[in-house]
Amino acid sequence: MQPSFISWFTLDSVALSTLASLEVHLIELDIAKGVDSPDWAALCPADSNEKKGLWVVEWDSSTRKGLSLLNPKDHPGIWSDRKPEFIRQVEQLHEPRNRHLAGLVLLELAAFDAYWPLKREKGDYQGLFIDENAVASFFELKSSQLGFSNSFVKQIRELVRSTHAAIAKRCPLTEPQEIKDWKLTSLALGISSPFWKGLFETGSTFSNDNSIYKGISSIGAGFATTSEFGLSSASPVIAGGGMIPALGIKSELPRHSLLTPESISLSAAKLEVMMKEFILKTPQGKETRKEVLAYQSNAIKFLTAQLPLHKTGGTISISNDIRQTIDILSVSLSRLQEL
């Protein structure tokens, strides 16, 4: 039997393309109106806007490839803000019947960041950042267009960050040597960890699946396909931190790129915000939380049982990641219980 909580966290192909399009629009606005030089100019020369443009081209390419493989028969694409298809989807998300889906899209937009390392040991984009002041009006406009107050995305962005910081305080992570000079925000660190750990590079998984996982992971931390957990759904992607309780659905270790502690901690923050700001405000909210807690408890028990089976070793160790994931899931569980 498929757990009912999963419907809160799934994005169909059209909603996923809408989200990816919004992220492109955000980056384009930042390039057009954001500050040209980073605060740490020694790490990145003054042509930072050119570098930002190169970053988004590389990001866009892997994202489009992943989305097209995810839905090869009817891939919606990534749209400009003037495309009729994009305008139509925004109008549909504004409708009251789609409020929770619109909220999920805006949560992921709020938790997005750019200019992180797209590959292991590649430092071309060090020091770049989104100018929050330049994109503030964008967040206000999109909040309003999708049926929320103007300040909604800004508030959710701050809430995700503060929740993530609270979780990280109880489960501190050591800054990895691979990115010590990048000055990444907490959001960028959570999204990018599978990339700078090299978990999407050749040989990690089967090529098509690898491209799908890389593509959807470019859009947000902890994005997974429903099929990875044996779920049948017309909406193929789990977002909003839903992959955390989903880990308890199937007694099978997920791909390593879903278990990086940096991504897990950001996913846990998104799950808590989703629970607090959306799920618990509905009549069935308490029952949904009960179900989420049960599956998250299952995930902790299963991962704990896996620890003795995975010894530390090699250049990419899953053992330490499992151990830290268990700690983060346990802290997240206790926080969810207190809501």
Image (cartoon, grey):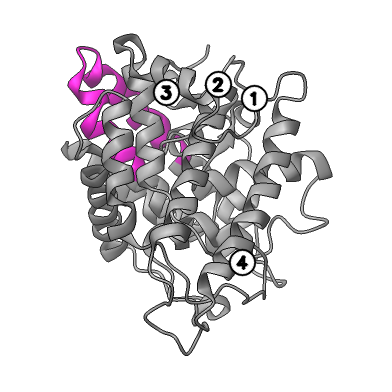
Q: CA distance from mark 1 to mark 3?
A: 14 Å
Residue 300 location (% of width, % of height)? 44, 43
In this image, 179 relative to 132: left or right? right
Mark whose residue sits in front, 3 or 4: 3
Which residue is disc 4 drawn over? 196
Which residue is disc 3 drawn over? 90
Q: Secondary structure at mark 3?
A: helix
Q: CA distance from mark 1 to mark 2?
A: 9 Å
In this image, 194 relative to 72: left or right? left
| CB contact under 8 Å: marks 3 and 2 | no
Membership of 278 in magenta stretch: yes
In this image, 177 relative to 29: left or right? right
Mark whose residue sits in front, 4 or 2: 2
Residue 253 location (% of width, % of height)? 62, 43
Query: On the image, which quarter does residue 40 sit in?
Result: bottom left
Q: Which residue range is magenta in the image? A: 270-299
Which residue is disc 1 drawn over? 76
Residue 119 seen in the figure: yes
* Type of amino acid at the residue the image marks with label 2: Glu
Q: Secondary structure at mark 2?
A: helix
Q: CA distance from mark 3 to mark 4?
A: 33 Å
Q: CA distance from mark 4 to mark 1?
A: 29 Å
Q: Mark 1 vs mark 3: which is more N-terminal?
A: 1
